[in-house]
Every structure is written in structure tokens, then in C-alpha cells.
Image: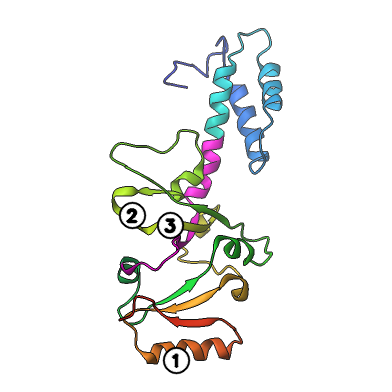
Amino acid sequence: MQRRGYDLENPDNPVLTLELVNRIESHFKKNFDKPYPIEEWKLIYDSANQGRNNDIELLLELIELMEAHKSYQYLIGGNFINCWNMGEDESSKMWENYTQKGKGVCIKSNVKRLKECFAEDDKYEVKIGAVTYIDYSTDYLPPDKNMHYIFTHKDENEFSYENEVRAYVLMKGREYRDQERICVPVSLDTLIEKIYISPTADEKLLNSVKAKTEEYDLKKEVILSNLHN
């Protein structure tokens, strides 16, 4: 608003008043987690702007700023991401980059299983989405202020081989800022289709994982990687 030259302290301002800004701020705080019907904002604007020149474009800019502020509350909170590779076949590069040599275990699932595995829990709202890969040197995130874009876009030059799907939880509030992880209840029977053991692992790890599945009555096939030689 300063950039547009509005003087909020001037009672003769033909477009905007400090009183109106305060009313919008108050309304925003009371309805922080609710969508804003545009007609409701128009009423607030018109009631404070009688006899003045209405500037609906400025009102819309204010609403966008409010929405951006709402998104910011999540960005300064906790963002917890669970990453999956979306591919029909195993990737030697994924095994190499994301497991310790000889110790890797991989869960095979699918998007349907991932969506259905989460227990009904009001505390966490799990979002699932495929990552879009863009060239950060030439491209930019879509400009419609969707806070989820930050978590669903990555640099194609460095990460496109991951072919990633993400399950993520955004927690609003600074108390989550320094929290390293959250535990979201899932049904393992629903989530897991098969279990694969690293191509560089030995029989000891294979047998150990099989023993664990039996211990917890998890009737899933445990397979040594198809890339094993």
C-alpha cells in the first residue's frame, strides 16, 4: 500500500482508511482458518467506504495478502514430508543414493495403498501429490500463491531421476518449527505390497527382515532385489 502511495492516516484519503484496514485485520484474525466469501469482504469494504471512490482491485489485493499471510503461518510451522519413488522398476541409483550399502530395505506400494493406509486421525491432514520438476534457473513457481507448490516442486536438473511422490503434513504454529518428525498412524497391511532387500545385502539381512514380518504377523513377501548379482 505504501508502494501505491496510500496515506492510511489521512482521513480525506479517497480510497482507503486506517479504520477499514483495522476492520479487515480483525475480521481476518477471527476467521483465520475459514475461506473468505468475496461478498462478505465487499460488504465490509462498502460499509467503510460510503461516499468514497471504491477500489475493488485494492480490496482483492488485500485479500491476497491476507491469504499469503495465512500460508506463511504454515511455512513458519512444521513441514513433514515422506518421499516415495514412483516407478514400475527398481532404480540402482535410488538404492545407491538413499540406502547404506548392504543395509537397504525398500517397501513396494502404490498410490491407492498410500491414500488408504492412513488411520482416521483428526490431528494430521495428510496430503499426497506427485512432484513437478522445473528448471529453477529459467522457470518459477506458478504465481497463484498456492502454498503447496513449495512442497511439490523440485529442480529437474538435480532431482528428476527420483520421479517422486510425496505424502506430507503441514502443521501451523512455531511450536512445530524445530520438531524433527511426527508419527502418523498407518495400516502397514494396507500400505505394504512387497518388501525388497538391497541388491548389495546378504542373506543375514534378508532373514532378519523375514523374521520381523513373522514376529508382527505381517504376511508380506520379502524379496532380494531384482538387481542382485
Q: Secondary structure beneath disc 3?
A: strand
Q: Which residue is mark 3?
A: 164
Q: Which mark is residue 59?
A: none
Q: Relative to residue 119, is residue 5 depicted above or below?
A: above
Choose between 96 and 25: the one closer to the eye: 96
Q: Secondary structure beneath disc 2?
A: helix
Whole-percent x, y for residue 102 in the image:
32, 82
Q: CA distance from mark 1 to mark 3?
A: 29 Å
Q: Is residue 88 magenta?
A: yes
Choose between 160 and 138: the one closer to the eye: 160
Residue drawn at the location 34% of the way across and 37% of the way down: 139
Whole-percent x, y for residue 25 in the image:
60, 32
Q: Which residue is mark 2?
A: 159
Whole-percent x, y for residue 183 in the image:
55, 69
State if disc 2 and disc 3 touch (CB < 8 Å): yes
State if disc 1 and disc 2 touch (CB < 8 Å): no
Q: Amino acid at mark 1?
A: Asn
Q: Which residue is mark 1?
A: 207
Q: Relative to residue 76, is residue 70 depicted above or below?
A: above
Residue drawn at the location 61% of the way across and 28% of the way down: 22
